[in-house]
Amino acid sequence: MQDFISRFGFATTPFTCEIRVEEYFINEIYQHPLEHLCRTVHKRMSAALIAPAVTGKTALLRALKAQLPAARSRVHYLQVTDAPTRDLCREIPVSSAAEPAANY
């Protein structure tokens, strides 16, 4: 990395992976799903965000999180990519410190 910095005369690395949340959805096409998710959360309803890989699901959720009031919201990340539906349904209440209603 030092070779890269000194070769081009940079004092520090000019690039980072961090993009501010406000810069994620500049395009109008991304505003629509973000508005729907905001309405869903404010109505205290459930939603599923399903899309192919590398389409911006995580970025969309980070933008949603940035719009939520920190005092009234809690965000939980569940990584159950290969888990069956039953395990996912069990993991959701456990992550919010609730007991699952039933087993099937």
Image (tube, grey):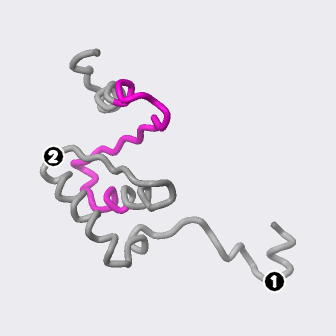
Furthest residue toward front: 52
The residue located at (33%, 24%) in the rendering is 90
Instruction: State whether the magenta stretch is mostly helix, strand or loop.
Output: loop
Image spot of residue 73 (x, y percent): 26, 47
Q: Residues within 10 Å of mark 2 (few under 14, many from 20)?
A: few
Could you tell me how far apart the alpha carbons at marks 1 and 2 are, in whole angstroms? 51 Å
Badge 1 or badge 2: first in the primary sequence: 1
**Callout 1, which amino acid?**
Phe
Furthest residue toward top: 103
Q: Is residue 21 above or below residue 47?
A: below
Q: Secondary structure at mark 2?
A: loop
Q: Tell me which corner region of the image, top left, top right, bottom left or bottom right, holds residue 51.
A: bottom left
The residue at which mark 2 appears reads as 44
Give the number of marks. 2
The residue located at (76%, 81%) in the rendering is 10
Name the quadrant of the N terminus. bottom right
Furthest residue toward bottom: 9
Q: Is residue 80 above or below residue 15?
A: above
Q: Secondary structure at mark 1?
A: loop
**Callout 2, which amino acid?**
Arg
Seen from the viewer's position, the closer of residues 71 and 41 is 41
The residue stretch that appears in magenta: 63-88
Image spot of residue 97 (x, y percent): 29, 27
Q: Residues within 10 Å of mark 1 (few under 14, many from 20)?
A: few
The residue located at (26%, 25%) in the rendering is 98
The residue located at (75%, 79%) in the rendering is 11
Q: Is residue 97 left or right of residue 42?
A: right
Between circles 1 and 2, the one closer to the viewer is: 2
Q: Is 64 one of the magenta-colored residues?
A: yes
The residue at which mark 1 appears reads as 8
